[in-house]
Image (spheres, rainbow, N blue to C red):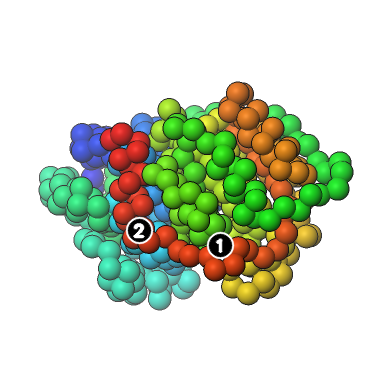
Amino acid sequence: MISLPEYGAELKRLGFDFYSGVPCSYLKHFINYAINECEYVAATNEGEAVAIVAGAALGQKKSVVLMQNSGLTNAVSPLVSLIQPFQIPILGFVSLRGEPGVQDEPQHELMGEITPHTLDLLKISWDYLSTNLEEAKQQLHRANEKVERNEPYFFIVKKGTFEPVILQAQDTKVTTSLASHKSREDQLPTRYGALCEINSLKDDQTLQLATTGKTGRELYDIEDAANNLYMVGSMGCVSSIGLGLALAREDKSVIAIDGDGALLMRLGNLPTNGYCSPPNLLHILLDNNMHDSTGGQQTVSANVDFVEVASACGYDRAIYVHTLEELKEHIESWRQDPKLTFLYMRIAGGSKSSLGRPTLKPYEVKERLQVFLGD
């Protein structure tokens, strides 16, 4: 079995000190080590964990994601539409529940059989992690070579690979939230108008992340800038990417611009954001009650009090925004007194006509952003 203090020290020596993941009985000792000795973000699901470490990697932190193989299926979307097109290097450890020939629960049988094939289909390089410490270190160095070439690399971990690590006592963090609800009629500006207002208030220390679809395309149309990231795919992951980036780069302000359909897809992101509470993260939801990019199909957002949800999930401030003037005021307030803030604004449906798309490849947008960060 592998001694985690020794293996973890090698990971640290190579620069891997940021982790996110979801519990797994095969990986519990590795997770305990990461919680005890490193920066670890407990995600609500595996796709969210991938997005969090992707955000940290954008901020130039070498990052590790930990998950059970059943959760690999949950992570497929960000792995194929975030990690691959943006060429974001992450290191992954996925357990092998349901290993053929090893007694396990019936729900793991098929996943155990197809885990290696799944990684092959995802075009992710991988290896079975050795149970010999020195061999495992050599494997780690080979994986690091891939990571330093902007490629992800995963290890498949079999039962009994790690020596036990006792989890140290953890503090329970409770945030006192300030919520401000609807008190007047909505102005209902266009998304383009709201994005123009947001973009006009940025400075040279601000990073703007726009969710997939028309939001990113309209922000690109307003101003293509080195501090912008236009998401493609990975629907629902923008605030998790923002979380990882905000934690990795406390010297920068991060604005994650979301849509109602996207946020509904991964509402579990909110409690993770609230628990971590980076003050340099501003999460803005522009709600048009529709999937505008795919033809205007209605979402269920009219039935959700997002301000109340964000407040209940631990955001320091959750505010209903009625007008563009209020939007400006609250963004400026966040800059003057940084706290994890959620701004909710209802907008009109529809988008700008003859809307183009970014001409840069996603990985070129990523590289440009990292140059902007100065690393």
Instruction: Report whether 120 appears left or right of 339.
Output: left
Under mark 1, the amino acid is: Lys
Q: Nearer the viewer, residue 108 or 93?
A: 93
> Residue 196: percent from the left, percent from the top?
59, 47
Under mark 2, the amino acid is: Leu
Q: Residue at x 60, y 49 (%)?
A: 195
Residue bearing the label numbered 2: 360
Could you tell which of marks 2 and 1 lies nearer the N-terminus? 1
Note whether residue 283 is visible: no
Residue bearing the label numbered 1: 214
The kind of secondary structure element at disc 1 is helix
Q: Residue at x 49, y 33 (%)?
A: 203
> Residue 53: percent from the left, percent from the top?
40, 47
Q: If the image is split into quadrants, where does the C terminus sit?
A: top left
Disc 1 packing (10 Å; few <14; some 14–19; many ≥20): many
The quarter of the picture where residue 17 lies is: top left
- The residue sitting at the front extreme is 354
> Residue 84: percent from the left, percent from the top?
33, 61
